[in-house]
Image: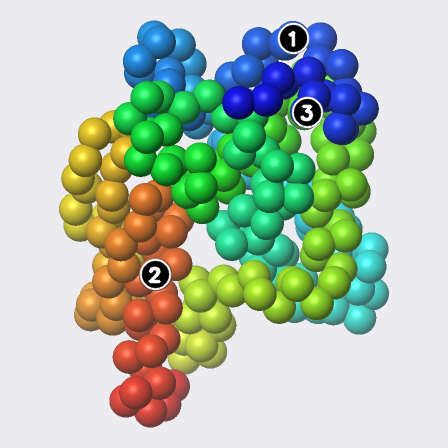
Amino acid sequence: MRETKELEKYFDLDFNDKQLLITALTHSSYANENKTESNERLEFIGDAVLDLLMGKHLYLKFKDFNEGDLTKTRAKNVCESALVEYAKECNLKDYLFLGHGEEKSGGRERIALQADAFEALIGAVYLDKGLAEATKIFDKIVVPLSSIDKVDDFVDYKSHLQELVQSDKRTLEYKVVMESGPSHNKTFITRVYMDGIVMGEGQGKSKKEAEQNAAEAALKKLAMKHLKF
C-alpha cells in the first residue's frame, strides 16, 4: 500500500485534517478489524458533491441540452462504471486500507470498492478544503475522462431502463431481496419491478452494482420480447 502523502502530492493537496483522508480510504473490512470509521459516510457526501459538480459542468458545456438530456448525461458520468475509471486514473486502489480477508480475496481490484472510495475522497476534500479544492480534483480527473470517447463505455443501465418506460408513465422500483456474506464483503441480490412485476434480477458486491445488473437483465428481457411502450 502506498503512502497517502503521495496521493496528496498528486492532487497538490495538504489536508488540514489528515484523518479525513485516512477515513476516505478506509474500507469497512479494515474499519471492522481495527475499530475505526469506514469511508461509507464520506461516500454519501462525495456522491452529492459529484452530482453538483457534474451538473454544473454539463450545464455550462452543453448549451443546447434540455433538462432530460442533462439528467441522462450526468447519470452516465457518475454511475459506478464511470467512478471506477476515475479511481483508476489516480491509482486510488493502491492507497486503500483493507482488512486481511478483503486483501487476500482480491478486494483491491473490486469495482464497487474503488468507485465508493473515489466518492469518499471527493467528500473528504470537500469537507476539509471546500468546494473549490474538490473542483480541482474534478477538473483533473473527471472532466478529461468524461470528455473523450471513453465516456461511451460508461453504461448506465438504470437510466436506459428509466428512459424506456417513463414515456408510458410506468413505475420502476428496485428492492434488495437478499444479502449474504460478512459485513465487509457482502453480496446483494436486487430485483427491479415495473408496475409491481419483476422484470429483472441482478447480483453485485454493492447495492449500486446489483441494481445496474438487474436493470441490464430487464433491458435484455424487454429486447427479447420486443415489448412496445
Tally the marks.
Answer: 3
The C terminus appears in which quarter of the rendering?
bottom left
Location of mark 3 (residue): 7
Marks 2 & 3, CB-CB < 8 Å contact: no
Location of mark 2 (residue): 213
Q: Nearer the viewer, residue 211 or 174?
A: 211
Vertical position of residue 8 compared to residue 142: above or below: above
Location of mark 1 (residue): 17
Q: Is residue 10 left or right of residue 118?
A: right
- Who comes first in sequence, dot 3 or dot 1? 3
Q: CA distance from mark 2 to mark 3?
A: 32 Å
Image quadrant where residue 194 sits: bottom left
Image quadrant where residue 53 sits: top right
Which residue occupies 80% across, 24% down?
Answer: 12
- Who comes first in sequence, dot 2 or dot 3? 3
Amino acid type at mark 1: Asp
Which residue occupies 65% across, 63% down?
Answer: 151
